[in-house]
Amino acid sequence: MVDLSETYRELASEIAIGSVADGELKVTEFFRIFAQIAAENGDCPDLDYTPVLNESGSGYRVDGFAIDLPEGLDEPSGDLHLAVCCHYQEESLPVINARDIDLAVSQVVRFLRAIGSAKTLEAMEESSHAYRLAMQFRQYMSRIARIRVLVLTNAHLKTRRKVIEARVLGNLPIQINVLDIERYERISRSGADPVEVEFKEDFEGSVPCLPASMGGTGFSSYLFAMHAPVLANVFAAYGNRLLEQNIRTYLQAKTSVNSGILKTIQENPSMFFAYNNGITGTASSVVTERLPDGTLGIASIRDFQIVNGGQTTASILYARDAMKCDLEEVYVQVKLSVVGEERLGEVVPKISEYANTQNKVSLADLASNSPVQMRIERLSKEVSTPLRAGELHSTRWFYERTRGQHKNLFAYKSAAARRRLETEYPKSQRIVKTDLAKYELAFDGRPHHVSEGEQKCFQRYVSSVLAGCGGGLELNDFWFKCAVSKAIIFRSLDGEIGRSQWYKDARALKAQTVAYTVAAVAQAFRIGGMQIDLMRIWRDQAVPKQLMDWMLGKAANIHKILNSPPGMVKNPSEFAKKEFCWTQHVLPLVEVPPQELANYGISLSDFGEEVGQGRREGKRNRELDLDLTMASLVPKAAELKRKATGMRLLSANNSRALEKLQAGRLTLTRAEKNSLKALLERLKVS
């Protein structure tokens, strides 16, 4: 049983430490932590932090927002996401109920009503978050089909119903979602919060179904026809949380609806079931019951995820809300695979991959257990930091490819074992995969992509950078050290900006300022025919003070530019996402660093030599590792072949490789070695 009071205290400590380190208010740090988790879990897209607070009269409040609009559609079709914080600083864990959530949502609704008044807008400062949000909302409101309010709270919500009743503002439905301390603990520990759809309680009753396969294998499946109004209501309530994570990450880069699906709903709704491929879903368990007519019905689904058919689902909701289509004759076929909770992480990504082979960016590449991600994690375990003067031990940087890995590292350990692990993997040296994308893209001169938010930034990083590294084979010790050095630069600058007076006088766009400054500084060295000496930063595990002081001066100027968008762009956070912000407003001002900073750089030719040497050493190490691995696999070759056959991973090359090992022969061809290495990674054999 999880102790939520302990989670509350740990979170309070993390917020306190982070707010001091970043020079931010505690509520700002709270928002950052919860918004990141909410985006990863699919509760919302990446949120822009825009604190709006009016305490006069009944008052209003909004802490963050995101606008999610399908491409190529001008009519109402998108979602307006608004977040409001209920952050408590009490000694013990507070408990809230549905009434408290209602009060929080009312603050958001009052803001939306207020900005509809010209008189209220005239009274606002044009530089305020409230005014800028109001202008942006008014600009896009004609394209909004629904409003999603997300309440972020470190209190424990106690309510019986899984789905909070929707509201209405004018013609717009308001869907309400809550991320409380219980959900926070679940997501931070396991990486996701299971969607539990209670058809019987919340969505018009149990759904008739047909068992398709049952047995003692830990796997079963059901086939059923879901009434489109029910599916629309479910998707309206849970949104992208229903989509399997890799699909969600992919679709955030390109949201769209399908014109063919919409045409069928409009012209031949009764034929939708016949014309559409339907939905493939997964679950960890279902609750069934006998319906009055004697047929079997699904009352609830736990861990419900749509692994194929996300576009169908989104299009049905769009048809209902934007096109006002009648869905009464529309039914959607659903194939639901029920997999034991212990195998969800293994099976669901495979179903997702096999069911979505048409995507340009491989969904498997986005998965936490892709070969590239596994390779980066392995490097983080192998590469130790240099032993600095006065220290008795070296440390490692922990690469967290799945949410909660670092926290779980210490779970169920003795106090002494935890202390040893905390010494080896300090919390300050944890890098999550979305952070790595930010560090790399900022350094490569793409701050506008970093400013799009963590999920889109990660998708771009995977498709443009990691996609070209040979399934992880191009990643080596030198690459990892450079990546960590970029992290040190990014984080150190972030902390210094937070403590600077010029930022405290105008708190806004810190994350964007950091990204643009890192990009500008890296480009300044490149203009001078140099690269920042990343190996020096790796050896020192710190940024030299003289270099940091110069970077901080650049950051102050960039902060002013970002907060002064041109007339055509009202909102500074949206300005930072535009490529012209970088190419036309920041890049032209970049100059070669002063001469006194030359010793903090290395010539591009010398850096190229270091990169080449790192690749050569990495290749030698991989070949040595594989030779040692092959020798150790000789007695296991037959077992591995059976396992690979059962998982349908056997190919001609890896089959021959395993047969040779089984016979005690280690002379494999290059193709057999490569195929065997790929197989071992899929089987998670090291």
Image (cartoon, grey):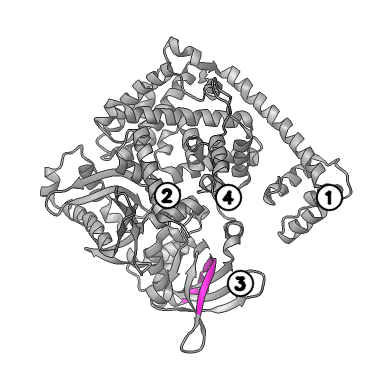
State how far apart marks 3 and 1 are (Cα).
Answer: 35 Å
Is residue 51 something one can see in this rendering?
yes
The residue beneath circle 4 is: 362
Q: Quadrant of the C terminus?
A: top right
Residue at x 24%, y 30% (from the top left corner) = 505
Q: Residue 635 shows which numbered tag?
A: 1
Rendered view: 563 above or below 330: above
Tell me the kind of residue under disc 2. Ile
Please tell me which of labels 3 and 1 falls first in the chain.
Answer: 3
Which residue is painted at 47% across and 39% down in the image? 435
Is the residue 604 above or below the residue 664 in the image?
above
- The reply to whether the C-beta atoms of the residues labelled 2 and 4 are less than 8 Å apart is no
Give the mark toward the camera: 3 or 1: 1
> Label 1, label 2: how many angstroms apart (C-alpha)?
44 Å
Q: Where is residue 553 in the image (x, y as percent from the top left)?
A: 34, 21
Magenta segment boundaries in residue numbering: 271-288
User: Is there CB contact under 8 Å for labels 3 and 1?
Assistant: no
Q: Mark 2 points at which residue?
A: 37
Query: Which one is nearer the viewer's eye here, 325 or 190?
Result: 190
Q: Earlier in the sequence, mark 1 or mark 2?
A: 2
As for residue 280 lying within the magenta part, the answer is yes
Task: Name the N-terminal-most of marks 3 and 4.
Answer: 3
Quadrant of residue 628 within the rendered picture: top right
To which residue does mark 3 refer? 220
Can you give x and y, in whole percent of width and height, for residue 633 in the image? 80, 47
Instruction: Please tell me whether mark 4 sits on a helix, a strand or a loop.
Output: loop
Kindly state the secondary structure of the residue where label 3 is placed: strand
229 lies above or below 58: below
